[in-house]
Image (cartoon, grey):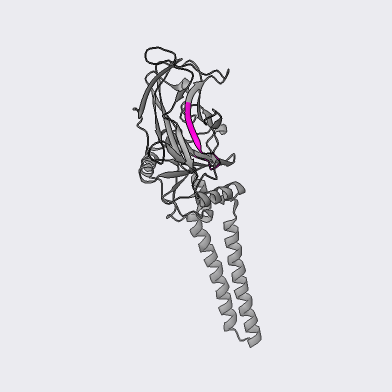
Amino acid sequence: MPPDTSRQPLRGIALKLASVAVFTAMAFAMLLWLRARPVGRRRGVALSAGGFLLAAIMVALSLNTYYHAPDRGAGDDYLALVAALRRQEHPNDVLLVSNHMYMGFFMNYNKARMKWYCLLSKQEEPSPEEVALLARLVNRHPRIWLAIDRVPALGLPRPPEMWLSERAYPVAEQAFSEYCRLCLYVTTDLPDPNTPQQPLWRDLGHGIRLLGYDIHTDREGQEIMAGDTLRFSLLWEASSTPDGDYVVFVQVLDEGNQIMWQSDRRPAAGFRPTPTWLPGNRIRDNYGLIVPAEWPAGRYRIIAGMYDPQTGARLPTADLAGKPAGDSVTLGEPLVLTAHQTSGAGSALDTVQP
């Protein structure tokens, strides 16, 4: 199982501290040797002061060299990431670091109080040990932060991000550089992988069906407030091998049908594009949204569907009887934003827009 690096010391730290201790001991040994020789009082005081000053300088230089070493990854991007973590953490949050090469950096610079773990695998799929750890954290923590050293455009494996995106709700992310990104997942009201909360059979043609959806808010009924987390999930099924590479759109519309929030991406945060589907596959496609503080009070509805990215044309849907049902589906009843919270509204991270 990947180590809990918030408690495990690094071998490199021990070696650095041992080096400091050796140099310090040598400096004090020299002082003792000099004091054992017959010297005048003034000269002895001067030698003692010089020795202490030399030892202090050596310790300071050694610690400074370690603290700012390039292999600690202390770039502006990761410094901004840990600052964002410190500002945005909630009680019982947990952090996952996707690259063990940054263990030393997070031990030095991460000031957030949450527990954190470092993952070791760089394969296409998470290792069995990582899957066990991820499953345990999802069951124990309502929010999971993922510090990842890869952006989607690089085309490199992102096993923990793939696992979390298919099971939890990605609600926010921010890229600080090409090799530094912070993602936030919410784990409450996780959807069943094969059964929708709200069945809704829609055939989009091209080998694609929408079996239904799940939708959850932080409050009873349809009321929402700024700072609340909306969680919704689509359950797709391949009726046959899809004939194209289609994009899912999800939109939050106000009473005037103005788009207040929008996501356009391939299913499952891009990890399950339609050309990879096989007949009978069911694909969970999860979304999350922290209600922005600037949204005015009113009624909001969520719609979803698919379109062809080559033409921009939406895929028309049909119901179980084959009757045309429009080019989008509405998820649940309209949500009612009634008031604004006085604190904790919104997020410093960007809304997820893959």
Q: Quadrant of residue 40?
A: bottom right
Please state which of residues 82 and 187 is positioned toward the viewer in this rendering: 187
Q: How many marks?
A: 0
Residue 246: tell me if it is visible: no
Q: Which residues are magenta?
A: 291-303
Whether residue 332 appears in magenta in the rendering, the answer is no
Please state which of residues 160 and 176 is positioned toward the viewer in this rendering: 176
Residue 209: image x %, image y %?
Answer: 41, 19
Residue 27: image x %, image y %?
Answer: 58, 72
Residue 284: image x %, image y %?
Answer: 41, 29
Is 71 drawn above or below residue 220 in the view shown?
Answer: below
The residue sitting at the top extreme is: 322
Whether residue 302 appears in magenta in the rendering, the answer is yes
Is 297 drawn above or below residue 312 in the view shown?
Answer: below
Relative placement, left or right, of 10 versus 58 is: left
Please state which of residues 255 and 260 is positioned toward the viewer in this rendering: 255
Q: On the rendered image, what quadrant is the N terminus found in? A: top left
Residue 190: image x %, image y %?
Answer: 37, 36
Q: Quadrant of residue 69?
A: bottom right
Q: Quadrant of residue 152?
A: top right
Residue 165: tell me if it is visible: yes
Q: On the rendered image, what quadrant is the C terminus found in? A: top right
